[in-house]
Image (spheres, coloured by chain):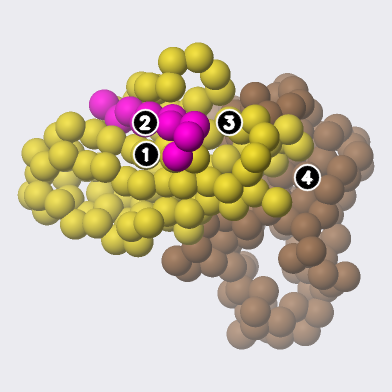
Chain colours: A brown, B yellow
Amino acid sequence: DTGVSQDPRHKITKRGQNVTFRCDPISEHNRLYWYRQTLGQGPEFLTYFQNEAQLEKSRLLSDRFSAERPKGSFSTLEIQRTEQGDSAMYLCASSLGQGSGNTIYFGEGSWLTVV
Amino acid sequence: AQSVSQHNHHVILSEAASLELGCNYSYGGTVNLFWYVQYPGQHLQLLLKYFSGDPLVKGIKGFEAEFIKSKFSFNLRKPSVQWSDTAEYFCAVNTNAGKSTFGDGTTLTVKP
């Protein structure tokens, strides 16, 4: 399968712990996005990369969140000192090219439960 | 900033009924519009998209959507739904920045 892959698929962590999610985009895609989705809502934009450059961060991305894409391929999203409100599905997506003509392809998401 | 509004939170239909899901967006510039579907336990999949040209767009599985610029709308339609269409449907708008803004989704339940 050559789609967007995310790891882990599920993570349960205690409040205050750090968690890291990994995303491997479709290989030739230069844009990579992180979204968050909670029950009853659509995906909310967090941040995106063009190659290794992080071009935009949402106000939703507090200082406890950090995302990297060091070599312009895979990306990691780290959440430090997790809070119960961080419980959500974290979605990664990728696309080819720039501008509004992109089709964004999503991974299956990483479920985070903070207890 | 752009926003997307989906009017119907939950729609329940019988098989063979016709479907129309509403989507309105708020953005003054050029947009590209998408409908995604999320089947139970699966990831978001693209149903159809509008970039330019014919405002009536046909997608997979018999779905179509019509872009009406004057109404800022991009409603999704299907003439005859099947039980397998039970899923959550998301409308999204994409602007020059390349990122997509999603509506809150409509859950469609089709009764056999």
Q: CA distance from mark 4 to mark 1?
A: 28 Å
Disc 2 vs disc 1: Cβ atoms closer than 8 Å? yes
Host chain of mark 4: A
The three-letter amino acid code for the residue at tag 4 is Tyr
- Chain designation of label 3: B
The x, y position of residue B83, in whole percent, is 16, 45
For residue A44: magenta? no
Query: Three-letter amino acid code at disc 1?
Result: Asn
> Which residue was labeled with disc 3?
B32
Q: Which mark is residue A55?
A: none
Q: Can the viewer see residue B35 in this picture? A: no
**Residue A48 bears which disc, if any?**
4
| Residue A29, position as x, y percentages in the image | 72, 27
Task: Estimate the spatial distance between the alpha carbons at disc 1 and disc 3, rounded to whole Å.
Answer: 14 Å
Task: Decide: few, some or many residues near mark 3? Use Cα within 10 Å; few <14, some 14-19, many ≥20.
Answer: many
The residue that mark 2 highlights is B65
Estimate how packed mark 2 is, as few (under 14), some (14 to 19) or many (20 or more) residues with alpha carbons within 10 Å: many
Q: Amino acid at mark 2?
A: Ala
Element under disc 4? strand
Q: Amino acid at mark 3?
A: Asn
Q: Are marks 3 and 2 on the same chain?
A: yes
**Disc ID at residue B75:** 1
- Say whether mark 4 and mark 3 are on the same chain: no
Where residue A51 appears, x then y in whole percent?
85, 32
